[in-house]
Image (spheres, helix red, strand yellow):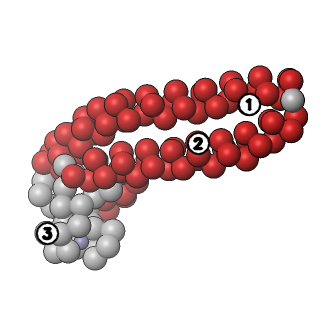
Amino acid sequence: MTRREYFTQILGAHTAMRKAALMAGLPVAVLSTGATVWMFLLAKSDSSKFAQFAAFALPVCVAAIVALFLYIDRVFSRSSPVCPSCSRHVRVLQRRRVWRSGKCVYCNCQIIEQ
Ligand SMILES: [Zn+2]
């Protein structure tokens, strides 16, 4: 695969990832913002309810953000370049390392021609 082909495929994967981030990120942003605002309102009025709500809301928000990242990574890797040796897709966090080295991060096979 040439550098131009790699770049074109990464660009397509970015487009798909942005659409997924917008569609799935909006509910996560609304959930996180709502929980934060509600926690500030509870902090002013009742500290016991604040602690109970924070103990519930913080793990839920963190889990939603982690799930969003995993979903975005999966959408990205569906249309990203594939290693010809081990057939693994390039992931979001690996794309720049593969671009610099030209090699697969798993099996060190040459993905991009030098
Ligand atoms: Zn590989």
Q: Which residue does the image show at 70% across and 26% down from the upper left?
A: 38
Q: Is mark 3 within 8 Å of ligand 1?
A: yes
Nearest-to-viewer mark from 3 and 1: 1
Relative side of 52 to 66, left or right = right
The amino acid pointed to by label 1 is Met
* 3 or 2: tag closer to the N-terminus: 2
Q: Which residue is mark 3?
A: 84
Q: Which residue does the image show at 34% across and 31% down from the upper left?
A: 23
Relative side of 25 to 29, left or right = left
The Cα–Cα distance between marks 3 and 2, rounded to whole angstroms, is: 38 Å
The local secondary structure at tag 1 comes to helix
The amino acid pointed to by label 2 is Cys
Asked whether the residues under the numbered discs 3 and 2 touch, taking CB atoms below 8 Å apart as contact, a structural biologist would say no
Q: Which residue does the image show at 43% across and 44% down from the upper left?
A: 68
* Residue 99 visible in image: no
Q: Which residue is mark 1?
A: 39
Nearest-to-viewer mark from 3 and 2: 2
- Return the x and y of residue 112 as percentages of the image width and height: 19, 60
Assess disc 1: are there few (<14), some (14-19) or many (≥20) residues with their C-alpha within 10 Å of its C-alpha: many
Mark drawn on residue 61: 2
Q: Is mark 2 within 8 Å of ligand 1?
A: no
- Return the x and y of residue 107 as percentages of the image width and height: 28, 76
The local secondary structure at tag 2 comes to helix
* 1 or 2: tag closer to the N-terminus: 1
The amino acid pointed to by label 3 is Pro
The Cα–Cα distance between marks 1 and 2, rounded to whole angstroms, is: 12 Å
The Cα–Cα distance between marks 3 and 1, rounded to whole angstroms, is: 50 Å
Q: Which residue does the image show at 36% across and 48% down from the upper left?
A: 71
The local secondary structure at tag 3 comes to loop
* 3 or 1: tag closer to the N-terminus: 1
